Amino acid sequence: MSEISNWIRLTATPGVGCEAAKKLLHAFGLPEQIFSASYPELKRVVSEKQAQALSGAPSAATTSLMERTEQWCTESENHLITLADRTYPAHLLTIPDPPTVLYVKGNAELLTKTSVAVVGSRNATTQGVLNAREFSDTLSQHGLTIVSGLAAGIDAAAHQGGLAGSGSTIAVIGTGIDIVYPAANRELAHQIAALGCIVSEYPLGTPPIASNFPRRNRIISGLAQGVLVVEAAAQSGSLITARMANEQGRDVFAIPGSIHSPFSKGCHLLIKQGAKLVDTAQDIIDELRIDELRFDELRQGRAPTTLGAMIADKANAISITPDNQALLSEMGFDPVHPDALAVRCKLDCADLTARLVMLELEGHVEMLAGGLVRRLVH
């Protein structure tokens, strides 16, 4: 049995998780030695049930998984990194339960780079998406790798921003690495595999299971030197990532927002609990003591690399009439109801509605739930 198959057999043995695997590796060495040990020897290290599972022959499903993984590893862009490998990310070794193996597709060297995790709501606002992309773009231009979870909303925007710079991006997923979830991010996943890397601790073929996603968050925070929360509700997976980051000794950053927005509640809670308030990417660069680069020179002549970035750049380039600029100034940056805005600006409802529709199409405002409208910051 090959070394790869022995590692896969260890991770696929029922009841043997990361903690038990660490104990076994410490006691016996490589997986080959673990499976060569007797039941009494195994029982001295792990539970009776775990020792029995390790002593028995691998199941047909485990054997099939080993064969499929061997075949998967023959492709040049695919890598299986184990706890025994020198290429295993040093940052992950400092967390309480590092993954026994990592399935990596793409540039595995990114796992050793200085990185920042960027996370937030799946149901993000337009402003939140812009913030995530622009912060990630700037950080990546300064050589920082962007780590996120390939979810919709903030995660997807963070990856797009990361791909735009030299730092690139890492997607940590909660499925097998041969599965893209959500399916809407398939094209983005292909871009990340080509220009960055995708990482999973789960075996090939693992479907989306709800409990796997909070667990994969420890890898997102563990790979990074700091975690930026862009938008988060009071109860969200992003707060789990922030909590794990705090427990792992990583810096936690949060972008504040409107006191009226439910998507700001989580960030405000983190700030109250000691997270660092940031309103520019430079705040993170300064806190992490990243050497300053000439960002303007790096951006010069660079075309947008994603459709989302092209749309954002196009919106920025659109000129605003003086009347609409005055309207935006009156709006401020907090959500406001059009009726209140009409009174404030002394406009009739029909005229105001027409202007708001045009401003939304041009990317300067967004419509929120409850009929509210909010100005966007570019």
Image (cartoon, grey):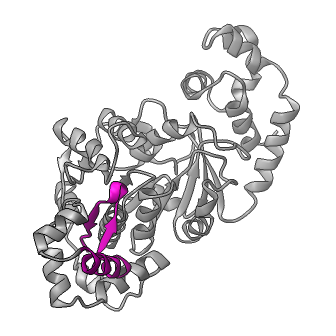
Residue drawn at 62 percent across, 14 percent down? 46
Quarter occupied by the N terminus: top right
The image quadrant that residue 344 belongs to is bottom left
Does the magenta portion include 174? no
Q: Is residue 123 left or right of residue 127?
A: right
Q: Is residue 306 visible?
A: no
| Depth order, front residue of 41/115 | 115
Q: Which residues are magenta?
A: 349-378
| Depth order, front residue of 144/55 | 144
Q: How many marks?
A: 0
The image quadrant that residue 144 belongs to is bottom left
Does the magenta portion include 361? yes
Q: Position of residue 87 (x, y in %)?
A: 52, 51
Residue drawn at 37 percent across, 50 percent down? 224
| Depth order, front residue of 47/252 | 252
Q: Position of residue 25 (x, y in %)?
A: 59, 27
Q: Is residue 31 left or right of residue 61?
A: left
The image quadrant that residue 240 belongs to is top left
Residue drawn at 19 percent across, 48 percent down? 259
Q: Position of residue 233 (x, y in %)?
A: 34, 43
Figure check: 325 above or below 37: below
Residue drawn at 43 percent across, 64 percent down? 157
Q: Is residue 85 visible?
A: yes
Q: Position of residue 118 (x, y in %)?
A: 37, 55
Q: Is residue 13 left or right of residue 334?
A: right
Figure check: 261 above or below 324: above
Quarter occupied by the C terminus: bottom left
